[in-house]
Amino acid sequence: MIDLYKLPLEGLRLNGTTQQVELKGGVSMRDLTWSVFALASDGDVFLEVKGQAIWQGVCSRCLAPLDRPLVVESQFLGSKDPDLVGRGSYALGSQDLDVVFLPEDRLNEAELVREQFELQAPMHPLCIDDCKGLCPSCGKNWNKGPCQCQPTADQVPSALNQALTKALAGIKLDPES
Ligand SMILES: [Zn+2]
Ligand SMILES: [Zn+2]
């Protein structure tokens, strides 16, 4: 635990590693190495979390297992002051820091690290950029070839979207034509 209001003048630095953190939905992070720095700042606390990890989840279209490196580097101001928190940001030197409400005197560094790493987790990761996904009717992985299903009304808009996206990409790539 970090005693937010009994920090040494020069600040407090903690380094650590965490083998595995389970997140929601069968997702996890492994091999976390992190450092936390806390420095008293005018009644509030400047906090910095840095580190890296491997995120383990699945492709958001075809559900294939997936690893992604994560790099975390975040700085913010922790404050008990609801007015300051309401304003949302705080200028410290040349930096504009987000303000996070920390009503307690003590901060659990493991929680802090978990939170900051989780914020960096990919929202819609893809195994490959043009992953074709799964057939909504039979569940076949379209990356491994087409299935025998008849296209349903639901699929038409997405096929149309894909055609449009392709057409637009073509225009961007070749503005002369
Ligand atoms: Zn995929
Ligand atoms: Zn199918």
Image (cartoon, grey):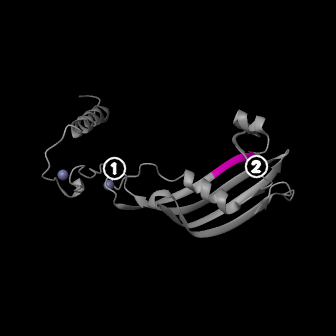
Q: Quadrant of the C terminus?
A: top left
Image coords of residue 84 (percent x, y)? 76, 36
Amino acid carrying label 1: it is Asp
Residue 110 falls inside the magenta stretch: no
| Label located before the other in sequence (2 or 1) | 2
Residue placed at 45% from the left, 57% from the top? 25
Image coords of residue 12 (percent x, y)? 79, 60
Amino acid carrying label 2: it is Phe
* Magenta span: 74-78
Q: Nearer the viewer, residue 77 or 51?
A: 77
- Main SS class of the magenta portion in the image: strand
Question: Disc 2 versus disc 1: distance between alpha carbons?
Answer: 38 Å
Where is residue 35, by image quadrant? bottom right
Direction from residue 143 to residue 17 in the image, left or right: right
Q: Quadrant of the N terminus?
A: bottom right
Query: To which residue does mark 1 refer?
Result: 129
Direction from residue 70 to residue 44 in the image, left or right: right
Query: To which residue does mark 2 refer?
Result: 46
Residue placed at 62% from the left, 53% from the top? 73
Residue 75 falls inside the magenta stretch: yes
Image coords of residue 85 (percent x, y)? 73, 38
Ligand 1 found in image quarter? bottom left
